[in-house]
Amino acid sequence: MSRWWDRYGFRTILVLMALAIAFSIKLTQAGVFAEAYYFVVSPFQSQKQLVLEDRLTNARILELEQRLTELEQQNQQLKQLLEYQEATTEKTIVAPIIARSRDRWWNRVTLGKGSADGIEKGYIVMGIGGVVGRVTHVTSHTSKVLLISDTTSRVGATLARSRQLGYVRGKDSSTAVMKFFNQVTDIKPGDEITTSHLSKLYPPGLPIGKIKSHHKIQNTTSEVEIELTAPIDILEWVDVQFFKPEYQP
């Protein structure tokens, strides 16, 4: 062993030192290449991340703005309904609209309050501007409402200015038709239509709509188109008015 070391020891040390230096250089070069790669690629990755974060932030801001607008609209409806509550002497319950069918948008809605809240079948549903419909079915926590815009709906009505009587039938839209019992000669666009004192389903004097157009036959009119004053298609809250109808259809 001593002879081998005397003969090859110094050479072995040199080889080991050379290997150590080479390994060190390799690590250094790898580090340099890694740093260079990071220096080149990092800005692009950072920019991509910034773009993604910017998009997410903008989407979130847009979502919050839309939500704020929605809450402001709901708040406005609630404010107007509360003002209506204060103005009326009738007992009422404010209720949210929680469901309506896309295919039957103008026909029926479901309210988020029911018999547990004091609502009964036959109660009148009011919205901003006028009559919305009447309660036809009640569970503990929900109520079904037949809208006056439904084609099967019939509401006893009065031409407020001249006191002419008739009834309003729905036509699945924001407009409806009033059919007079007698021929009418004195009628103007904008005339108000209210519920009739002869109605067995609604109390008298509630606003229904305003005359939009009419067709005269020999200077008389028996049928007019009216614009419903309650925005039935966009309502989210309604006021349920206590009322005992003379009969339940």
Image (cartoon, rainbow, N blue to C red):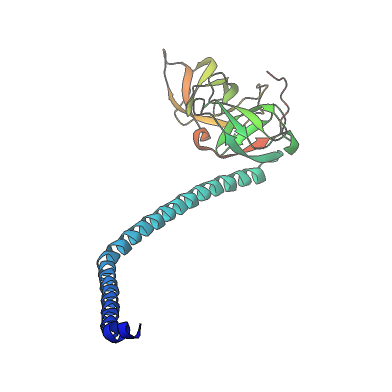
**Along the line of sight, the residue nearer the viewer: 102 or 160:** 102
- Among the 4 quarters of the image, the one containing residue 162: top right
Please give the count of numbered marks on the rendered protein: 0
**For residue 5, side relative to residue 209 (left or right):** left
**For residue 67, side relative to residue 197 (left or right):** left
* Above or below: residue 220 compared with residue 71: above
In percent of width and height, residue 218 lies at 41, 12
In percent of width and height, residue 232 lies at 52, 33
**Along the line of sight, the residue nearer the viewer: 6 or 58:** 6
**For residue 120, side relative to residue 163 (left or right):** right
* Above or below: residue 239 compared with residue 5: above
**Along the line of sight, the residue nearer the viewer: 35 or 130:** 35
Residue 185 visible in image: no
At a point 46% along the width and 23% down the height, the residue shown is 225
In percent of width and height, residue 95 lies at 64, 39
**For residue 202, side relative to residue 182 (left or right):** right
**Along the line of sight, the residue nearer the viewer: 239 or 11:** 11
For this orientation, the residue located farthest to the top is 218
* Above or below: residue 46 compared with residue 208: below
Q: Quadrant of the N terminus?
A: bottom left
- Among the 4 quarters of the image, the one containing residue 147: top right
At a point 70% along the width and 20% down the height, the residue shown is 248
In percent of width and height, residue 49 lies at 35, 60
At a point 59% along the width and 22% down the height, the residue shown is 155
Residue 232 visible in image: yes
Q: Quadrant of the C terminus?
A: top right
